[in-house]
Amino acid sequence: MLSSKKKKNNKSSILNPLKDPPFSTVLRVVRKTFEDCKTVRSILRGFNVPIDERDVSLDSSFLDELQGIIGRNKSFTLPLVFIGGTYIGGAEEVKRLHECGELKKMIGGLPSVVGSSVCNLCEGLRFILCPQCNGSHKIYSEKTGFRSCADCNTNGL
């Protein structure tokens, strides 16, 4: 439930006030979660401000970071949006704040993005297939056999 008080994150000092990430996923296994993340992404991009989105399905370190912020044993539903170190809410809260004009006020102090903010190489996903292991996360050597690739994450990105 959304209250008039902002929900404070007890570890807000580790967040960058201009680049607080919406934690989300492009994983389409849970349709509602995917659609909610897509909606929030669209709303935030409509303000033409820098967004540092962290997709927990692409890199487990993002999930570790999120659990460090909200607590390891707490359950959550994606997306989660932070602005200036303050937890804003999930999809419903962001939609509600956008519809009533409050989100625009919260984002008002952020700088505008000039031009396209989407990388041509990764298309905004922040990851590309690892060129060392071709996305397998395994490297073969005749001396040692197969080993984990040191250049990418567990998804080969």
Image (cartoon, rainbow, N blue to C red):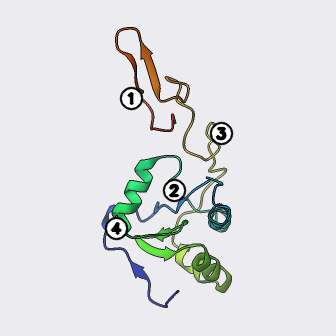
User: What is the tally of numbered marks visible in this picture?
Assistant: 4
In the rendered image, the residue lying farthest to the top is: 142
Q: According to the image, label 4 marks what residue?
A: 71
Residue 15 visible to the viewer: no
Q: According to the image, label 3 marks what residue?
A: 120
- Give the amino acid type for the residue marked by disc 1 in the picture: Ala
The residue lying toward the viewer, choosing from 155 and 90, is 155
Q: Residue at x 35, y 9 (%)?
A: 143
- Give the amino acid type for the residue marked by disc 4 in the picture: Gly
Q: Residues within 10 Å of mark 4 (few under 14, many from 20)?
A: some
Q: CA distance from mark 3 to mark 2?
A: 16 Å
- Residue 150's disc number: 1
Q: Residue at x 68, y 82 (%)?
A: 99
Q: CA distance from mark 1 to mark 2?
A: 25 Å
Q: CA distance from mark 4 to mark 1?
A: 28 Å
Q: CA distance from mark 1 to mark 3?
A: 25 Å
N-terminal label among 3 and 4:
4
How far from the left and from the top, in percent, is residue 142?
40, 8
Q: According to the image, label 2 marks what residue?
A: 52
Q: Residue at x 62, y 43 (%)?
A: 119
N-terminal label among 4 and 1:
4
Q: Is residue 82 above or below residue 148?
A: below
Residues at discs 3 and 2 in contact (Cβ within 8 Å): no
Mark 1 residue element: loop
Q: CA distance from mark 4 to mark 2?
A: 21 Å
